[in-house]
Image (tube, helix red, strand yellow):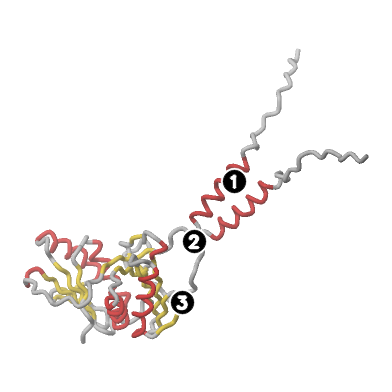
Amino acid sequence: MKLERKTRSKVEIPTASMPDIIFMLLIFFMVTTVMREYDGLDVLLPRAQEIQKLESKREITHVWARKDGVVSINDHVVPVKKMRQLFYAELVKKKGKMTVSLEADKDAPMKLISDIHTEMREVNALRLSYATLRKGGNNQ
Amino acid sequence: MIIKERRGPQEIPSSSMADIAFLLLIFFLLTTTMSMDKGINIVLPPPGQEEIEIPKENITNILINQAGKVLLDNKPFKIRDIAGFAERAIARNKNMIFSVQPHPKTKYDVYVQVLDQLKMAKAKKISIANPTE
């Protein structure tokens, strides 16, 4: 004789709290998101292994340096000798806590990089980070 | 006499709230970028610092010429061998200062590779000289 199966109540995933969960995710992403602010210049970054993250996005000033010597700070193209004014303005805006992220082309000459160092030192902006990509597996 | 019809309390429809939240969520998911800024961090010396005399045995000179060849303590070195050399130098002398001296036309790439090697050897004292011929 076949036993008749008892009709079970349908099992469902509770969906009542779904909006709350989604709202929580939403708030998380809203807080962590930082819109890409700058377009930058066209550069090929060098690669390195020992790279560190930069802590606070709000303290970073982006500097791009192309191999032909064109330099831009936060998307303002300026001559190298006038960089200190913009560095100073940024330093004031960030209340003295500023890190420069230098995104220089890998074929840029050291003369240019050194000139940027000098401009930064002039206004006491001393924290610098050479932006690099992570090196792939091989040792080359 | 007109009797006002009693209306029930008006409510904002909340059934579509989840959909709206989903839409916003997807937007923020797509626009978010997790910290992209990575690199080799250094601190420059303050301006106007006068030259300090450093005993010769505490300095390792690293010269980089415009072709990207490296001269370490007057001996030619392969870039990827620098880390090992630097590590031994630090083990011998904790106050070892590495003085990187590039040529004005040295490529930035080579310079970053050399710095990377020094960072790999956990070198804390790195000095960057102004490029000279």
- Label 3 lies in what chain? A
Q: Using the numbered discs, state the Cα–Cα distance from disc 1 to disc 3 in whole angstroms.
A: 36 Å
Residue to which mark 2 is pinned: A34
Tell me, yes or no, whether dots 2 and 3 are on the same chain. Answer: yes
Which of the marked residues, 2 or 1, is nearer the chain's N terminus?
A: 1
The residue positioned 29% from the left and 83% from the top of the image is: A111
Query: Which mark, by number, is residue A75?
Result: 3
Q: Residues within 10 Å of mark 2 (few under 14, many from 20)?
A: some
Q: Position of residue A98 (x, y in %)?
A: 35, 67
| B127 versus A52 height, above or below | below
Residues beneath discs 1 and 3 located on the same chain? yes
Which badge, 1 or 3, is on the more N-terminal residue? 1
* Residue B6 position by quadrant: top right
* Label whose residue precedes the other's in the sequence (2 or 3): 2
Residue A49 vertical position relative to residue A8 in the rendered view, above or below: below
Q: Secondary structure at mark 2?
A: loop
Amino acid at dot 1: Ile
Q: Are marks 1 and 3 in contact (CB under 8 Å)?
A: no
Disc 2 to disc 3, C-alpha distance: 17 Å
Q: Residues within 10 Å of mark 3 (few under 14, many from 20)?
A: some
